[in-house]
Amino acid sequence: QVQLVESGGDLVQPGGSLRLSCAASEITFRTYDMGWYRQAPGKERELVARITSSGSTNYQDSVKGRFTVSRDNAKNTVYLHMNSLKPEDTALYYCNAYRRLLGVPREYWGQGTQVTVSS
C-alpha cells in the first residue's frame, strides 16, 4: 500500500524557518515527480513547489526565494525548506507523488502536516 507521510509542521514565528519532510513507501520513488501543496482554511489547495524525477524544480511566485524543494532518492524522501515564513504561509501542507506511465497517470497524496506562522 502506497504511503506518503509528511512531518515537520509546527507553530513558528514570522521570519522563522521550518523543514518539511515527506517519506514515501511502496512506490518507485525516483520515477515520480514530487510536489508540495498547501490549503489554508476557506481556500483551495494550491501548488507550492514541485521537483521532477529529473530534478527540475518550479515554485509558486509567492514562495520564490524563500522556499526550496529537494529530494533524496536513496531515502525515498522529499523536503521543503521554508525560510522567512509569513503568516500567509499558514496552511495544511500536503505531499504529492505523480507520474504518467504509458499514458496512465498515477497520483498519491499524504495526509498533510500543519504549518502555523504566528507571533
Image (cartoon, rainbow, N blue to C red):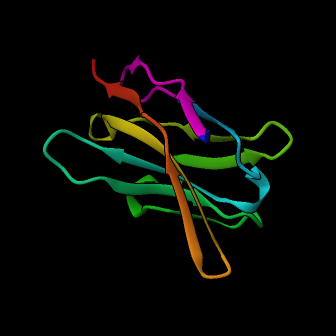
Q: Identify the residue at horizontal 13%, vertical 44% (top origin).
A: 42
Q: Residue at x 33, y 25 (%)?
A: 116
Quarter of the N terminus within the rendering: top right
Q: Position of residue 60 (x, y in %)?
A: 43, 61
From the viewer's perspective, tell me whether residue 43 is left or right of residue 98: left
Q: Position of residue 5 (x, y in %)?
A: 56, 31
Q: Eyeballing the image, is 53 above or below 26?
A: below
Tell me if residue 8 is in the magenta stretch: yes
Furthest-bottom residue in view?
Answer: 103
Frontmost residue, 17 versus 101: 101
Q: Residue at x 52, y 37 (%)?
A: 83
Residue that sits furthest to the front in the current view: 1
105 is higher (above) or lower (below) than 64: below
Q: At which x and y percent is residue 110?
A: 48, 39
| Occupied quadrant, residue 35 | bottom right
What residue span does the magenta drawing correspond to? 3-17
Please say if 78 is above or below 102.
above
Between 90 and 41, the one nearer to me in the picture? 41
Q: Is residue 38 visible?
A: yes
- 13 inside magenta stretch: yes
Image-based side of 46 in relation to 53, left or right: left
Quarter holding the C terminus is top left
The single residue placed furthest to the right in the displayed view is: 74
Compare residues 53 and 67 and report the one nearer the observer: 53
